[in-house]
Image: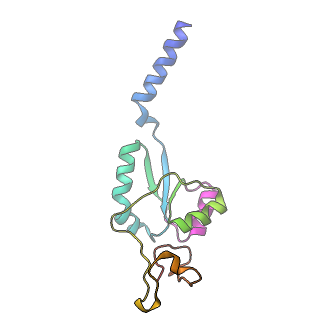
Amino acid sequence: MQKIISALSSVLLSLIFFSPVLAKDYKIAVTDIQGMDALISEWGPFKSALEKATGHSFEFFPVTSQTATAEALRSEKLDFAVTGPAEYVAINKLTNAQAMIGLARPDYYCGIVVKNSDGINRVDDLKGKAVSFANPGSTSGHF
């Protein structure tokens, strides 16, 4: 019994100290970025930090739409997707994918813009009003 415990301890310690040897490769998509050059330029530092923090490697997987993202997840060609909230809801319905983390960016925020003459001063004043979206599935362009 002592030999078994010793052997298991050795295996566990090896796994802890040599986990980079067991590092996995994952594919990650960003749904609002078109093309590999833009992915590398805009998300390269995030990818590098993620690799450093986890010991795993991540490869960008360019997608052209939320449908393409859902299909890549469903067919297991893609492991992770960075999406906006509306896209997440649609992708979740198609794939059962689950949100793991939320990201905040200092240069990305939203607001509701109305004309002064509309008399809208509070969120409650929007009840019954029409809201316009710039891109179906996007929550970044509501004008």
Q: Residue at x 52, y 7 (%)?
A: 2
The magenta span reads: 62-78
Q: Position of residue 22 (x, y in %)?
A: 46, 36
Task: Kindly indicate the quadrant of the structure image that contains residue 54.
Answer: top left
Taking the image as shown, residue 62 lies to the left or right of residue 43, namely right
Callout count: 0
- Residue lying at the far top of the rendered structure: 2
Please tell me whether residue 77 is drawn above or below residue 10 in the rendered image. Answer: below
Task: Kindly indicate the quadrant of the structure image that contains residue 47.
Answer: bottom left
Please tell me whether residue 22 is drawn above or below residue 60 in the rendered image. Answer: above
* Screen quadrant of the N terminus: top right
Q: Position of residue 61 (x, y in %)?
A: 49, 61
Residue 42 is one of the magenta-drawn residues: no
Q: Residue at x 56, y 67 (%)?
A: 87
Between 45 and 110, the residue placed more toward the observer is 110
Please tell me whether residue 59 is drawn above or below residue 90 in the rendered image. Answer: above
Taking the image as shown, residue 127 lies to the left or right of residue 30, namely right
Taking the image as shown, residue 89 lies to the left or right of residue 122, namely right
Q: Position of residue 97 (x, y in %)?
A: 60, 55
- Residue lying at the far bottom of the rendered structure: 117
Q: Position of residue 139 (x, y in %)?
A: 50, 73
